[in-house]
Amino acid sequence: MNAESIIETRSVCKNFGGFKALTDVSVKIRPGVLTSIIGPNGAGKSTYFNLLSGAFSPSSGQIFFMGRDITALKPHEFARVGIAKSFQITNLFPHFTALENVRIALQAHVSRYGLWRPRCDLEGLSERALDLLGVVGLRDRAARPARELAHGQQRALEIAVALAADPKILLMDEPTAGMSPEETKVMMDLIRKLVEQRTVVLVEHKMKMVMGISERLIVLHHGELIAEGTPDDIRANDLVKRVYLGHGNH
Ligand SMILES: Nc1ncnc2c1ncn2[C@@H]1O[C@H](COP(=O)(O)OP(=O)(O)OP(=O)(O)O)[C@@H](O)[C@H]1O
């Protein structure tokens, strides 16, 4: 690899039966940068997200993470190399408290790496879980069952769960979906904070939000990469303008 990419796709294609959902997408995602994947409905954003997270394997092409070809890794192995995802669908134990949800994720991570030892006790894990709840602004909700948290707080908790694996890259699928304007603002502030420590990649529909928060954008249309660059580059791109106007999708 080179310092300019943490994760890279080379000519990835994804076919569903005879349908080409992605065609020859080559992208280098830069480390420590907030990158968003945008495009009109059906452009292939979720499919691309699923390739980056390891949920889908490409039909052809390769994926590199920190210079290593990870194309053939299994989904759980993507997590192991340092790629975490936070989904649109909540992925929590609703009856467990916020603290327990994060602690379980930490426990899974610690035991997976064979780091389990007596000193790595419940208290230590609880402390680390509290720290992570602090990062996402939920420290004062630690004892609340997940199901009792507001929607925006559940999304924040999911992020704390994803951070338990200490990922190098965090993939977020529509992190502000279904949120009130206030919740959206809190989430955007959190995303800005997260990218200080790691690479963050978003799939997002809300153009205004994406333009305001992202440093780089990847634009897909009909499964092809049609543009890549800063928000200013993308705003000025005629093809992108035409594609969005054509969809009435701003
Ligand atoms: N499992 C699947 N089987 C068949 N076709 C699929 C599958 N997943 C996605 N597709 C098709 O691939 C295309 C891209 O879908 P994808 O969900 O990646 O787009 P998207 O940009 O995320 O769309 P949206 O903005 O509507 O969520 C769509 O035409 C979709 O119908």
Image: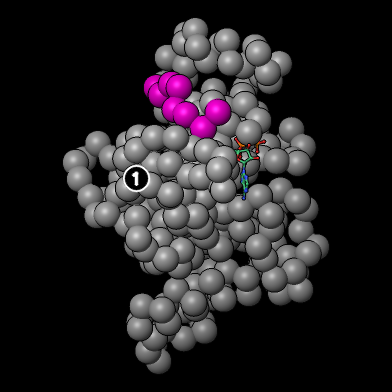
Numbered range of the magenta stretch: 222-229
Which residue is depicted at the point 24% across and 36% down?
4
Image x and y of residue 122, in percent: 52, 84
- The N terminus lies in which quarter of the figure? top left
Amino acid on which the number 1 mark rests in the picture = Gly
The overriding secondary structure of the stretch rendered in magenta is strand
From the viewer's side, name the closer residue of 13 and 221: 13
| Location of mark 1 (residue) | 61
Residue located 43% across and 41% down the image: 13
The outermost residue toward the bottom is 118
- Quarter-of-image position of residue 69: bottom left
Q: Residue furthest right?
A: 148
Horizontal side of 222 relative to 113 (left or right) equals: right
Pointer 1: residues within 10 angstroms few (<14), some, or many (20+)? some
Looking at the rendering, which quadrant does residue 90 occupy? bottom right
1 is within the stretch colored magenta: no
**As displayed, is residue 154 above or below residue 192?**
below
Answer above or below: position of 130 versus 44: below
Q: Is residue 50 visible?
A: yes
Instruction: Give percent across and percent down for residue 150.
Output: 77, 53
In percent of width and height, residue 98 lies at 66, 67
- Kindly indicate the quadrant of the structure image that contains residue 130: bottom right
Q: Is residue 158 left or right of residue 72?
A: right
Look at 74% across and 40% down and name the residue there: 179
Name the quarter where the C terminus is drawn: top right
What residue lies at 55% left-to-right and 28% top-to-bottom? 222
Q: Quadrant of ligand 1?
A: top right
Q: Nearer the viewer, residue 53 or 150?
A: 53
**Residue 223 among magenta residues:** yes
Give the SS element for disc 1. strand
